[in-house]
Amino acid sequence: MKVLLIGSGGREHVLAWKIKQSPKVDRLFCAPGNAGTAEISENVDLKDTDLTGIVQFAKNEKIDLVVVGPEDPLALGLIDELNTAGIRAFGPDKAAARLEGDKAFAKEMMRHRSVPTADVRIFTKYRDAKAYIASRDVGIVVKAAGLAKGKGAIVCEDPADALIALERIMVKREFGSAGNTVLVEEKLTGPEVSVLALVDENTIYVLENAQDHKPIGEGDTGLNTGGMGAYCPTDLLDDKLLTQIESEILVPIVDALRLEGIKYKGVLYAGLMLTSGGPKVLEFNCRFGDPEAQPILMRLKNDIIDVFDALIDNKLDSITLQWDPRASICVVMASGGYPGSYEKGKTIAGLNQANAMDGVVVFHAGTKHTNGQVITNGGRVLGVTALGETLQDAADLCYQAVDKIKFDGAYYRRDIGAKALKKVASTT
Ligand code: AMP
Ligand code: GLY
């Protein structure tokens, strides 16, 4: 069969890597892809938001399945357009993807079914938001309601910081129209965990969980990014907590959508904080996490095409996911300056040496080929991912691989997985 994968990040490289392993797949295209996907698929020069171009390409090439990685094309309605054209596609439709694309809508859906989440006030007027923030005296999170590449949530220690954040979003318009509406949330505390589930019309199938590291700085300091590293599984969720997350969060949110006439089909990602009052939702995403997809999918043993097919046909209950028992970890190497401005075009050395290590795969994100070399082409450049018997083994191997890779200004966090490892150390 012929598969077209949409996107160009690390998540798409790991998806391409999994799709390519399926004996069912004869040809794999990736639009637009990166230097990593170019090595295992045929990159197509189409933006992931060029819906017309993508549908046309899929028709011309008689694509059997389109897999959509990122949120932007989902929010724009790529799945709807593909389905209208009679093309099989994996991902939620436009109405369902609103759960990620419109945080105010997500909060409303959560309220309908009392899904636990941070208390919130929603504003469309700067003046009103400013007055509300000024009246608060505790930690506050200010969020742009629309899509902002993971950077639109600003966690503030006090109202003075929150007023600056509000100005960035609503006055300086740092996230463009994503900041037309803002959410002002209570600041929650506790460990974070990403719970991803496959959802079809009958079944919610929870995947192995992962922990992301959103802030740019070690010790979780500084600005939020798309994610600087992740590991899988975590030891944060026991069976009881998982059951609670399913029954209090995943089932009710899918139900709330259904009551609005929206059938959720695809990956449902719940970003959760494990507070002293129980798990609470920070956000929902409508696709695999990036970088969570790298460590999660590196452990998935199933043919991923079988998984996509089962979900599309509402037969998720017929599959059993098989997991590699080893731990996995992904460390993101970014361009110096990210998540602010950064330079592109730096030559990357050491990729082959890192990839040659047993148990290591270097997934590309912001990379491209120029004159036979791989150069940087984005904020998050690579997701170096490794498997190990224990998380410590995986982390040691991963950082050995990271050390082999060089480019000007390369930045990465040295403490991916460190909190979990410290916990292990203190209990042994
Ligand atoms: P979001 O894009 O909404 O997931 O937010 C990005 C990150 O900001 C999360 O992963 C958390 O680290 C942090 N965050 C978001 N909302 C809250 C909240 N209500 N309290 C504390 N931290 C938050
Ligand atoms: N890693 C966070 C996200 O994919 O949104």
Image (spheres, rainbow, N blue to C red):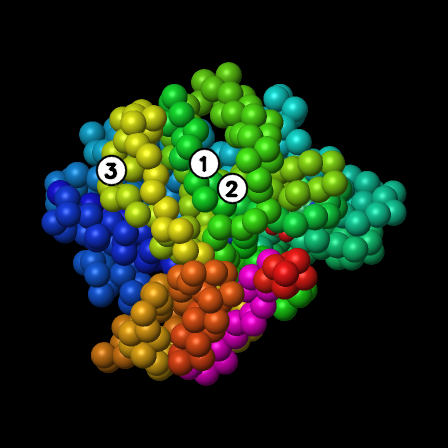
Residue that carries the numbered disc 2 in the rendered image: 195
Q: Magenta stretch mostly in which secondary structure?
A: loop
Query: CA separation, marks 2 and 3?
Result: 21 Å
Q: Mark 2: few, some, or many residues within 10 Å (few <14, many ≥20)? A: many
Magenta includes 409? yes
Residue 48 location, x and y as percent?
Answer: 34, 50
Residue 147 location, x and y as percent?
Answer: 52, 46
Whether label 1 touches label 2, CB < 8 Å: yes
Residue at the (31%, 51%) spot, across then down: 15
Residue at the (74%, 40%) spot, across then down: 276
Point out the tag, 2 or 3, that comes first from the N-terminus.
2
Residue that carries the numbered disc 1 in the rendered image: 206
In the image, residue 95 sits, relative to residue 127, either above or below, namely above
The span shown in magenta is: 406-420
In the image, residue 300 sits, relative to residue 39, either above or below, namely above
Residue at the (20%, 30%) spot, across then down: 86
Whether label 2 touches label 3, CB < 8 Å: no
| Left or right, residue 211 beside residue 20 | right
Q: Which mark is residue 306?
A: 3
